[in-house]
Image: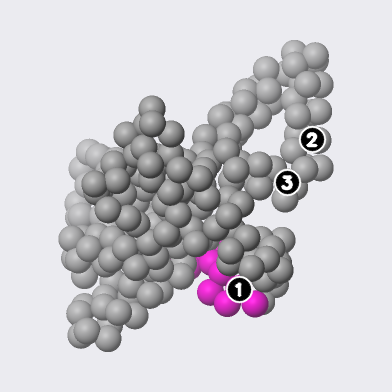
């Protein structure tokens, strides 16, 4: 109930041989898999593309159970088993850790692992080049996160009562990490509207339509 596999394939007339399969594991760190639209488009001419589509926790009833890091890893393993050994796996940012764990577990059990694994910008060793997020995690006790960023889903959602890290808080955190960049972006957007530069304004709108679309994460996974 927390994740599903989505398949894309661009049919090309006269294709002589099957295209290689690639699984893109999208981040579950607040945004939807649609942020990887450009990556999917880049792979489509040469690959069969599969991507993880993580579900907004506020839409999952409590009766479906919880979701934590172990479950994330199990989902990845199930997807890799489903796709078979002739697949390449690419983890973009946050999922580098669970994908590495999934591959390691499969190898330790004697299972056939994917043809290749690529980890792009993943925090394999978070002690190296720490970001503001890393520093916050090191400077605050576990109880601070549990008491300050975890809320229950309201009754008007299917996941009512589920403990989550809400999307609106994550969005505030995203903006707070680079406030100057966002301020400048909106200033340029305003100027583009005044100048009648509709193309640049539309690029801004498309980016923020995606950037402002956030999902709730299950508290067990976040914590």
Residue drawn at x 57%, y 38% is 168
Residue 154 percent location from the top left of the image: 43, 34
Residue drawn at x 22%, y 84% is 109
> Local crowd at mark 2 within 10 Å, few (<14), some, or many (≥20)?
few
Name the image colouring. one colour
The answer to whether any part of residue 50 appears in the image is: no
Q: Is residue 28 depicted above or below 69 in this figure?
A: above
Q: Secondary structure at mark 2?
A: helix
Residue corresponding to mark 2: 183
**Of marks 2 and 3, the one in the foreground:** 3
Separation (CA) of disc 2 from disc 3: 11 Å
Residue 15 percent location from the top left of the image: 22, 47
Q: Which residues are magenta?
A: 118-127
Separation (CA) of disc 3 from disc 1: 20 Å
Q: Quadrant of residue 89?
A: bottom left
Which numbered disc, 3 or 1, marks the residue that appears first in the sequence? 1
Q: Is residue 166 magenta?
A: no
Q: Is residue 121 magenta?
A: yes
Residue corresponding to mark 1: 126
Residue 198 percent location from the top left of the image: 67, 17
Left or right: 149, with 5 as reference point: right
In front: 113, or 128? Answer: 128
Residue corresponding to mark 3: 176
Residue 140 percent location from the top left of the image: 68, 66
In front: 196, or 139? Answer: 139
The answer to whether any part of residue 206 appears in the image is: yes
Which numbered disc, 2 or 3, marks the residue that appears first in the sequence? 3
């Amino acid at each position: 109930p927390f994740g599903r596999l989505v398949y894309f394939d661009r049919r090309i007339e006269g294709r002589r041989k099957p295209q290689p399969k690639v699984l893109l594991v999208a981040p579950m760190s607040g945004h939807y898999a649609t942020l990887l639209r450009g990556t999917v488009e880049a792979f489509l001419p040469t690959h069969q593309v599969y991507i993880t589509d993580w579900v907004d926790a506020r839409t999952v009833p409590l009766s479906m159970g919880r979701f934590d890091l172990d479950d994330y890893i199990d989902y990845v393993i199930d997807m890799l088993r489903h796709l078979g050994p002739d697949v390449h796996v690419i983890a973009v940012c946050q999922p580098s850790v669970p994908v590495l764990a999934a591959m390691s577990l499969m190898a330790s059990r004697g299972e056939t692992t994917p043809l290749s694994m690529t980890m792009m910008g993943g925090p394999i060793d978070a002690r190296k080049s720490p970001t503001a997020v890393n520093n916050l995690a090191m400077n605050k006790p576990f109880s601070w996160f549990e008491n300050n960023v975890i809320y229950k889903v309201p009754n008007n959602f299917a996941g009512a009562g589920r403990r989550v890290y809400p999307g609106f808080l994550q969005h505030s955190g995203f903006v707070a990490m680079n406030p100057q960049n966002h301020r400048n972006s909106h200033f340029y957007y305003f100027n583009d509207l005044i100048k009648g530069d509709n193309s640049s304004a539309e690029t801004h709108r498309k980016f923020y339509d995606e950037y402002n679309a956030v999902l709730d994460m299950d508290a067990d996974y976040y914590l």
